[in-house]
Structure formats: structure tokens, C-alpha cells
Image: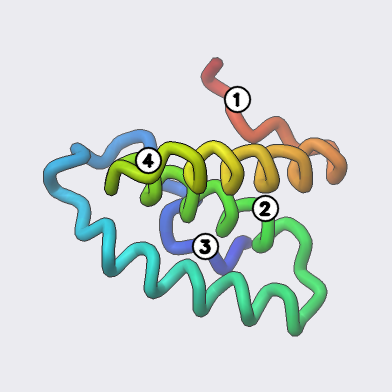
Amino acid sequence: MSLSVLEPRVETAEPAAVDWLGVVAREKAALAMAVRLGDWMSQGYSHRALGQAALALGDQRRGRQQLAEGTYILRALGIDPDPAA
């Protein structure tokens, strides 16, 4: 189980229904906790959630960077970050 608040449901939420600033605040806290715990899976999912939030808020550079970092971590763990793709 990941500490990320978006991991299990990010693909099903309607973009307009998501409080992206709230997501950023929670994911930053989740990422900090995952780093302290050494929980790489949660770090990967938190980076991806932060990337999705950044893209939704219009920050393309940060969004791509966070998504890439999260994807890299998850793939290094043998987790397919996009199982439906």
C-alpha cells in the first residue's frame, strides 16, 4: 500500500472534481514521509501524483519532471506505472 492519496484512483477522477492544490499539499507530505521511511513505492506514486497535479495546474515542466521521476522509481521496482496503457 502506498502513502500516495491518488495512487488507486487518479485515472477515474474527473479533472474538474479534483482539488489539485489540496493534492499537492497532501502529496508533498506523503512524499516527505515516504523518504523518511525509505518507502520507494510510495515515493514513486507520490512523484507521479505531484506530476499529474502540476500538469492540471498548468506547470508543464514540473509535471513532466515529476512524472518521469515517479515512473523511473516504479519501473526500477518492477512496477508498471501504467498498467492500462
Q: Are marks 3 and 1 in contact (CB under 8 Å)?
A: no
| Kind of residue sitting beneath label 4 | Leu
Q: Which one is closest to the eye, mark 2 or mark 1?
A: 2
Q: Which one is closest to the eye, mark 1 or mark 4?
A: 4
Q: Which residue is mark 2?
A: 44
Counting residues from the start of the chain, the first of labels 2 and 4 encountered is 2
Query: How many neighbours does mark 1 have within 10 angstroms: few (below 14), some (14-19), or many (20 or more)?
Result: few
Q: Which mark is residue 83?
A: 1
Q: Which residue is mark 4?
A: 55
- Mark 4 to mark 3: distance in Å? 17 Å
- Mark 2 to mark 4: distance in Å? 17 Å
Residue 30 lies left or right of residue 42; in this view the side is: left
| Kind of residue sitting beneath label 3 | Ser
Q: Are marks 2 and 1 in contact (CB under 8 Å)?
A: no
Counting residues from the start of the chain, the first of labels 3 and 1 encountered is 3
Give residue 65's position: percent from left, percent from top: 60, 43
| Kind of residue sitting beneath label 1 | Pro
Q: Which residue is mark 3?
A: 4
Q: Are marks 3 and 2 in contact (CB under 8 Å)?
A: no
Q: Quadrant of residue 47?
A: bottom right
Counting residues from the start of the chain, the first of labels 4 and 3 encountered is 3
Query: How many neighbours does mark 2 have within 10 angstroms: few (below 14), some (14-19), or many (20 or more)?
Result: many
Give residue 32's position: percent from left, percent from top: 62, 78
Disc 2 element: helix
